[in-house]
């Protein structure tokens, strides 16, 4: 059986090799020296988009190229070290003209380029995007309301009120995502705003007071009326849209009784159905079925289930 760590490492945005240098980040002199050093590389973020030299390569600015922009950045974050470089991200204010860094590339959505960049760059871009979002959302202390400031190389924020001084850490919201099967069929659903024909695995946020497995059973039941009898962990994936951790599972349904209509589900899904592998193969061939994005763990969960059957490899059909 494959080690879960190895399994997760294959998911986009996961398993890239980066030393986050958390201990060194506590030393402001070390951080400043790294920022000015020849090995520093900077990833700009603007309006949740990453700067790309082209669709498959992120822009990595050298210190002299980043220097004019750092004083106006909303946040600067030490991401970590790898292969002799120290990586930082910085977030430009939303009112920065989009052509500001045009000499170095164009700002693009990670959802659009995530499948085209290298595994390492995908992880860096996702981390940079997530940190820019977190900084933008935590400018004020949730305890006392005073402004917060960035410290430890931007990996933590701290309340500026001396009487409070609360430290605020980057947050990640766990969400479950699950391929539920019954005999030779898989349960997939779609939201009304998705492109026609697109179906995906069932997903939802973990609620306070429940385990991951509880969340799987609850979400499947709420969204489709299906009751699961087994829940098995698969792998996980950082999902910086804007700040989730997707925890992937497979589940077996107790029966195929399903009800996705507004009378018996929470209405989050427009439709949910059981699909055989043949349904998917035929739907892909005639264009009535489409898969979720290839950067998502849902794509992987569906693919692995599909490939275990006798309809060929899903990757050859999409
Ligand atoms: Zn405070």
Image: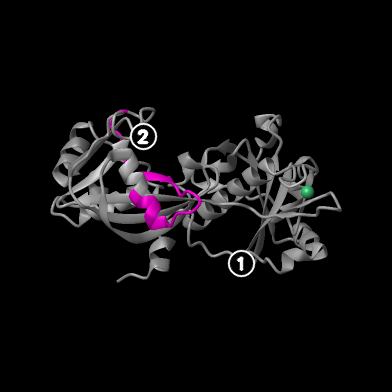
- Give the magenta-colored segment's residue range: 196-217
Residue 96: name its quadrant. Answer: top right
Tell me the residue that label 1 is attached to: 19
Mark 2 is surrounded, within 10 Å at the Cα level, by few (under 14), some (14 to 19) or many (20 or more) other residues, namely some
Q: Is residue 175 above or below residue 3?
A: above
Report the Cα–Cα distance between label 1 and label 2. 42 Å
Q: Is residue 158 above or below residue 267?
A: below
Q: Indicate the position of residue 68 as horizontal and vertical percent values.
A: 79, 43
Q: Quadrant of the N terminus?
A: bottom left
Q: Is residue 201 visible?
A: no
Disc 2 on helix, strand or loop? loop
Q: Residue at x 18, y 45 (%)?
A: 256
Residue 230: name its quadrant. Answer: bottom left
The one nearer the camera, 304 or 123, is 304
Q: Quadrant of the C terminus?
A: top left
Q: Is residue 74 magenta?
A: no
| 71 horizontally vs 119: left or right | right
Q: Indicate the position of residue 82 as horizontal and vertical percent values.
A: 60, 65
| 185 horizontally vs 260: left or right | left
Answer yes or no: do the residues labelled 1 and 2 have beta carbons within 8 Å? no
Q: Which mark is residue 291?
A: none
Q: Is residue 204 magenta?
A: yes
Q: Is residue 123 visible?
A: yes
Label 1 CB less than 8 angstroms from ligand 1: no
Q: Indicate the position of residue 277 as horizontal and vertical percent values.
A: 17, 46
N-terminal of the pair, mark 1 or mark 2, is 1
Residue 266: name its quadrant. Answer: top left
Label 2 CB less than 8 angstroms from ligand 1: no
| 53 horizontally vs 119: left or right | right
Q: Which mark is residue 266?
A: 2
Q: Residue at x 31, y 28 (%)?
A: 262
Report the mark closest to the observer, 1 or 2. 2
């Amino acid at each position: 059986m494959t080690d879960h760590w190895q399994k997760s490492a294959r998911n986009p945005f996961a398993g890239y090799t980066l030393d986050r240098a958390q201990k060194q980040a506590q030393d402001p002199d070390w951080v400043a020296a790294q920022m000015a050093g020849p090995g520093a590389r900077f990833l700009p973020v603007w309006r949740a988009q990453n700067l790309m030299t082209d669709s498959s390569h992120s822009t990595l600015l050298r210190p002299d190229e980043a220097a004019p922009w750092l004083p106006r950045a909303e946040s600067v974050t030490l991401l970590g070290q790898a292969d002799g470089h120290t990586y930082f991200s910085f977030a430009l204010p939303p009112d920065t003209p989009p052509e500001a860094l045009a000499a170095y590339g164009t700002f693009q959505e990670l959802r659009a380029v995530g499948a085209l960049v290298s595994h390492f760059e995908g992880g860096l871009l996702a981390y940079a995007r997530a940190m820019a979002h977190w900084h933008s959302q935590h400018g004020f202390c949730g305890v006392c309301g005073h402004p917060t400031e960035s410290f430890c190389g931007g990996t933590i924020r701290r309340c500026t009120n001396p009487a409070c001084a609360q430290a605020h850490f980057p947050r990640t919201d766990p969400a479950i995502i699950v391929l539920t099967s019954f005999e030779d069929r898989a349960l997939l659903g779609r939201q009304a705003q998705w492109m026609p024909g697109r179906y995906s695995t069932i997903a939802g946020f973990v609620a306070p007071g429940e385990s991951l497995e509880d969340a799987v059973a609850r979400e499947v039941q709420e969204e489709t009326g299906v009751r699961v009898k087994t829940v098995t962990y698969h792998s996980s994936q950082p999902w910086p849209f804007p700040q989730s951790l997707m925890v992937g599972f497979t589940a077996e349904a107790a029966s195929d009784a399903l009800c996705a209509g507004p009378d018996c589900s929470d209405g989050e899904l427009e439709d949910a159905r059981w699909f055989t592998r043949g349904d998917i193969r035929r739907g892909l061939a005639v264009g009535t079925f489409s898969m979720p994005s290839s950067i998502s763990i849902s794509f992987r969960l569906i693919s692995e289930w599909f490939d275990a059957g006798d309809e060929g490899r899903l990757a050859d059909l999409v």
